[in-house]
Image (cartoon, rainbow, N blue to C red):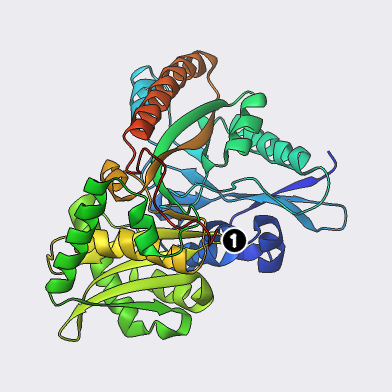
Amino acid sequence: MRWRPRLVRRIAEIDSAAWDACAGTENPFTSHAFLLALEESGAVADDKGWAPHHLALEDEAGTVVAAAPAYLKSHSYGEYVFDHGWAEAYERAGGRYYPKLQIAVPFTPVPGPRLLVRSGPNQDERRRALIATAVDLVRDNALSSLHVTFSTEAEARLMEGLGLLRRRGQQFHWENRGFADFDAFLAALAARKRKAIRKERREVAAAGIAIETLRGAEISEEHWDAMFAFYMDTGSRKWGRPYLNRRFFSLIGASMQERIVLFLAGRDGRPIAGALNFLGSDCLYGRYWGSIEEVKHLHFELCYYRAIDHAIRHRLARVEAGAQGPHKLARGYLARPTHSAHFILDPGFRRAVGDFVARERLAVDADIDELESLGPFRKDGAGGDRSAG
């Protein structure tokens, strides 16, 4: 092999500059700083069922030329590409599904590169070498499977060519069509959708809510205290066990200052809700939201409309607001496919899963096509000032 594989049990064992030279700047969640904050805060650890097993390839000089954030998993929580049914079926048949190997960003359903390679020639060859290393790890340790989740489409196709099963899901993303401002975006919507958004925004404004946008050093520990309280409230109501802890927010606040945008809502000088976003090179990623006071439409204002407005002002190409949410369609977000790839060690179980993902993919594609036809934009193509694109 042209490159020496290396298994890394702590992301801190890899130099941050070397890792980021592979990860690039497009996606903040594969950065060394984000992955390190997950580990240093204890949110990701062996006893949490996310045991770091990062993969790296080094050349003869010891330079890291490729890497993948990888974890040995003892459960399927925090992944958002659901395989609980696979685990149950395999174990009913007498198999042992856990532990499994997961190449992913923990708790982060954000599409992006998972097979990280330093710039230069032979990039796909290095990606194939990473997957070969991961598959060898599965075989040598009799693990049930390898899962590469929320990869790019190109990576998923490459892995399919290596024999992995390609799976498809969907999310809702907002795409900037060169809108000059938020009003130009509204003008491109069908009249009913446009009126509904204006009504929702008026009602939030009439509720006496003050909203500020905080960046970088403007975000204090007091702001993080408030945001963590919002996060815990939402997490407790939605899935019962929030994955992150308070220290994580302080760590990213210190190490990722310039990649964070916080929309904070307050009443009478007291924070009551917040939406935490991360900046990529051309995308605003909405990640965590929460509130301690019920205000009608405030969720839409903070998570969707403020994010769209920020993206337009800063000439960003997209807003990605996370998993779930067909309700996003009425607010300018469109259904887009997401991708993952899976290696199943047992041949019989692999055939069964392969049949399932083939049928699932047809259903997902049909759903995306239908949602596209129901899109919120004017059918005549008029509206919206595209001169700023």
Residue found at the far right of this picture: 60
For residue 326, side relative to residue 52 (left or right) = left
Q: Secondary structure at mark 1?
A: helix
Q: Position of residue 166 (x, y in %)?
A: 53, 27
Camera-side residue: 220 or 345?
Answer: 220
> Hey, what amino acid is under mark 1?
Ile
Choose top left, top right, bottom left or bottom right for residue 94. Answer: top left
Camera-side residue: 173 or 236?
Answer: 173
Q: Quadrant of the C terminus?
A: bottom right
Camera-side residue: 346 or 231?
Answer: 231
For residue 67, side relative to residue 264 (left or right) = right
For residue 182, side relative to residue 61 (left or right) = left
Q: Is residue 278 visible?
A: yes
Choose top left, top right, bottom left or bottom right for residue 26. Answer: bottom right
Residue indicated by mark 1: 11
Q: Is residue 276 above or below residue 368?
A: below
